[in-house]
Amino acid sequence: MHSSIVRARQVGVFLFFFLFFTFLALRLLYLQVIRHQFYYRMANGQHTVSIELPPRRGTIFDRNMHVLALNLNCDSIFANPREIENRAIVARTLAPILGLNERFIQQRLSKEKSFVWIKRKASPQESALVKKLKFDGIGVIKESKRFYPDKSLACHVIGTVDIDNNGLEGLELYYNKYLKGESGWLISTQDAKRKLLESYQDEFIAPKNGLNLQLTIDEVIQSIAERELAKVYEKYNAKAASIIVMDPRNGDILAMANFPNYDLNNFSSRPAESIRNRAVNDFFEPGSVFKIVTASAALEEKVVGMNDKFYCENGVYKVGRRILHDHTPHGVMTFREVIEKSSNIGTVKVAALFGAERMYKYMRLFGFYDKTGIDLPGEVVGINRPTTKWSGVSMLAIPMGQEVTTTGMQLACAISAIANDGYMAKPRIVREILDGNNLSVRDFRPVMLRKVISPQTSMQMRDILAGVVKTGTGKKAKIEDFSAAGKTGTAQKVEPTGTYSHNRFIASFIGFAPAGRPVLSAVVCVDEPRPVYYGGDVAAPVFKNVMDESLKYLNAKS
């Protein structure tokens, strides 16, 4: 009896352990074989980490290889909320150091993640203070930050980037695919405390740094242009102002500036009105500067001679229901004087000699129906109609710069064509794309778009426009050591009612120097200057000062 009980117990114990170990074996088989891939991936997820290695964004240089935009190393603050015991204390301590709202930091730390950003691209002082705290779960990682040494210089040309170094505006946006580069990756193993084990790096793909840009912009001429434009912008309480300085021989943009402007290193706090690159993003009625097209057409079509005479009606000319006025009454004037003194009446009478179709022809040749093709984002083209949509009074308005719209960039190309023996160059703002050793990857050669007028007409126009500066409406553009040529403009802005304003104007001057062999051309536009608003008084002096200093800097011959 006793032995049978013992045997039963032995069998029971044996069966128990047999079934237990069978269960363990089956469980092990299930985990190791059937669920192998699942737990393998889980283990890898816990111990293997993939780290993106951001590329270094390319540097932007001016034409003389002076740095306009570069990357600097900086610290960014991150957190692993799972390792932080008292998140409220950490948030309360970090808020004043990082200049952040305490609630914002608490929200970041409340996430059940192993990695969250607290502050990207912190200052060196902020980073140093965070490191001193030695909080578990709070760390510092190296990133690169875009930096602009000259702050606001050429801000509308260069543009800005976002927190991840992606281009947002200007050349930073237009050439982002070249500047940005490609990210690399590090696949490594980490221990239980999430510390990387350098001896267990499984794979490393180096980042491909961005390429560099060399611009046509000249830092010195850009500085001169911005300084002089700032003076007129402030002196005349203008709504806005812009300037373009160009080499008419090859289309190189040596300076492009707008006011109001902003600090590229602090773009998040810029006012909305400072964002646009008005030189390429805004169009307007040009007024009398457009008379260069009318005069060029008349000479090219040989319908006038330089000394042909026109009666300018003593300043008041009634045509049908429309009455034209000159700002100063004139009687009989030669064709040359009509342009030099900027007579609206004389200009309209000249245009009547060649008609609407040929007016339209030269508007197209001078590029007022097309974008210039400059490598900047957001370029617009004016709203200009074909002759089939011109009204009965269009030929009383268009020849003197009304019922036609243009951008500053289009005007720069037009005046440069006259300066360049009648040939129009495509505007160029990037000279080359360079690799990390500043060796050329791609260059952008000058491009001549078309012949606009003959060299003979160009020479005649240069002579007339030199007269504008010597004895005409552009006397304040006269340069002491160099001859200059150009045209003034004072354009009435259009009111919402569709009528021309009597107190809102755009003052402008377009020209080149030296007049005989032009080295530089320029366009100056000042939007709503007060109380003085004439182009010859407001914009011409800016042209004079910029040209004088720039030509001396370039050692140009007079």
Image (tube, rainbow, N blue to C red):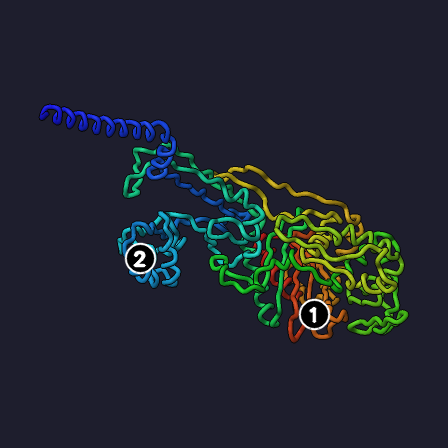
Query: What residue would you read off at disc 1?
Result: 505
The answer to whether residue 228 is seen in the rendering is no
Q: Residues within 10 Å of mark 2 (few under 14, many from 20)?
A: some
Image position of 24 (left or right of 521)? left
Image position of 260 (left or right of 182)? right
Task: Choose top left, top right, bottom left or bottom right for residue 30.
Answer: top left
Say what secondary structure mark 1 lies in. strand
Alpha carbon distance from label 1 to label 2: 60 Å
Query: What residue would you read off at disc 2?
Result: 87
Q: Residues within 10 Å of mark 1 (few under 14, many from 20)?
A: many
Amino acid on which disc 1 is placed: Phe
Q: Where residue 471 sits in the image (x, y, percent)?
A: 74, 66
Instruction: Please tell me which residue is depicted at 68% across the width and 50% down the height of the picture.
Output: 248
The answer to whether residue 255 is seen in the rendering is yes
- Assign the C terminus to one quadrant of the image: bottom right
Residue lying at the far left in this picture: please name it: 2
Task: Choose top left, top right, bottom left or bottom right for residue 93.
Answer: bottom left
Q: Where residue 362 sits in the image (x, y, percent)?
A: 80, 53
Q: Nearer the viewer, residue 490 or 274?
A: 274
Image position of 321 (left or right of 181)? right
Q: Nearer the viewer, residue 555 or 177?
A: 177
Instruction: Please tell me which residue is depicted at 21% across the width and 29% down the height of the picture.
Output: 16
Q: Where residue 49 sits in the image (x, y, percent)?
A: 36, 39
Instruction: Please tell me which residue is depicted at 30% across the width and 33% down the height of the picture.
Output: 199
In the rendered image, the vertical position of residue 172 relative to residue 11, given as above or below? below
Task: Choose top left, top right, bottom left or bottom right for residue 411.
Answer: bottom right
User: Tag 2 or tag 1, which sits nearer the N-term?
Assistant: 2
- Badge 1 vs badge 2, beta-carbon distance below 8 Å: no
Q: Where residue 232 sits in the image (x, y, percent)?
A: 60, 68
Amino acid on which disc 2 is placed: Arg
Q: Nearer the viewer, residue 558 or 467?
A: 467
